[in-house]
């Protein structure tokens, strides 16, 4: 798989120094998601404060794309409103379905645009989406 080298660096940085890794003691909900095709697994704790995403923490094992993506996602959505977090989720989900045709909304996705190239590799899209789907699942359980 070939990704733009700058983007590859962003992904490797998050893989080597993951943000918000290590599960919090408290949580509103905990979810565990797997991507069997690659062997990626993530456990995610979510704490909401009313309409605000107060904290996301996670632990997991898997490929660099899956782990870097959870790290980027946590960094992006902590402190955001539930509505903003869903807008960011939607933007990332759309990017992953773009088959390499979209470069992503940098205002919304920040480091998340580094995963744009992953959308060209159907087998890896599930890696990139793993943590995001876990967040979506957890937030839906708390909010709905
Ligand atoms: Zn993977």
Image (spheres, helix red, strand yellow):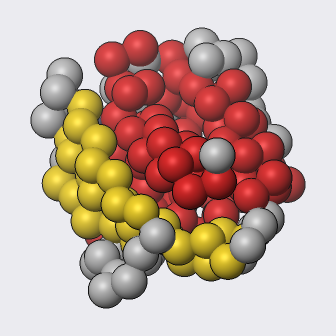
Q: Position of residue 31 (x, y in %)?
A: 34, 52
131 sits left or right of 22 in the view: right
Does 126 sit above or below residue 32? above
Q: Residue at x 74, y 37 (%)?
A: 91
User: Farthest residue in the front direction?
Assistant: 144
Q: Residue at x 81, y 52 (%)?
A: 83
Does 59 sit above or below residue 69? below
> Which one is in front, 106 or 73?
73
Residue 140 visible in image = yes
Image mark count: 0
Quarter placement of the N terminus: top left
Does 9 sit above or below residue 119? below
Q: Position of residue 3 (x, y in %)?
A: 47, 35
> Which one is in front, 43 or 7?
43
Residue 18 visible in image = no
Q: In terms of image quadrants, where is residue 92? A: top right
Q: Position of residue 115 (x, y in %)?
A: 54, 40
140 sits left or right of 67 in the view: right
Q: Residue at x 52, y 49 (%)?
A: 141
User: Farthest residue in the bottom direction?
Assistant: 25
Q: Residue at x 38, y 27 (%)?
A: 126
49 sits left or right of 30 in the view: right
Ligand 1, image quadrant it occupies: top left
121 sits left or right of 87 in the view: left
> Which one is in front, 18 or 46?
46
User: Farthest residue in the right direction?
Assistant: 107
Q: Position of residue 98 (x, y in %)?
A: 66, 17
């Amino acid at each position: 798989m070939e990704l733009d080298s700058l983007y590859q660096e962003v992904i490797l940085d998050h893989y080597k120094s993951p943000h918000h890794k290590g599960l919090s003691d408290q949580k509103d909900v905990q979810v565990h998601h797997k991507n069997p095709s690659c062997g990626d697994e993530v456990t995610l704790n979510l704490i909401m404060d009313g309409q605000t995403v107060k904290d996301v923490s996670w632990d997991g094992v898997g490929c660099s794309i899956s782990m870097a993506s959870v790290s980027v996602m946590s960094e992006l959505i902590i402190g955001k409103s539930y509505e903003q977090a869903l807008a960011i989720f939607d933007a990332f989900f759309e990017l992953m379905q773009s088959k390499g045709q979209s470069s992503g909304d940098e205002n919304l996705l920040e480091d998340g645009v580094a995963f744009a190239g992953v959308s060209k590799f159907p087998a890896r899209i599930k890696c990139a989406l793993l943590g995001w789907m876990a967040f979506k699942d957890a937030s839906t359980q708390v909010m709905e």
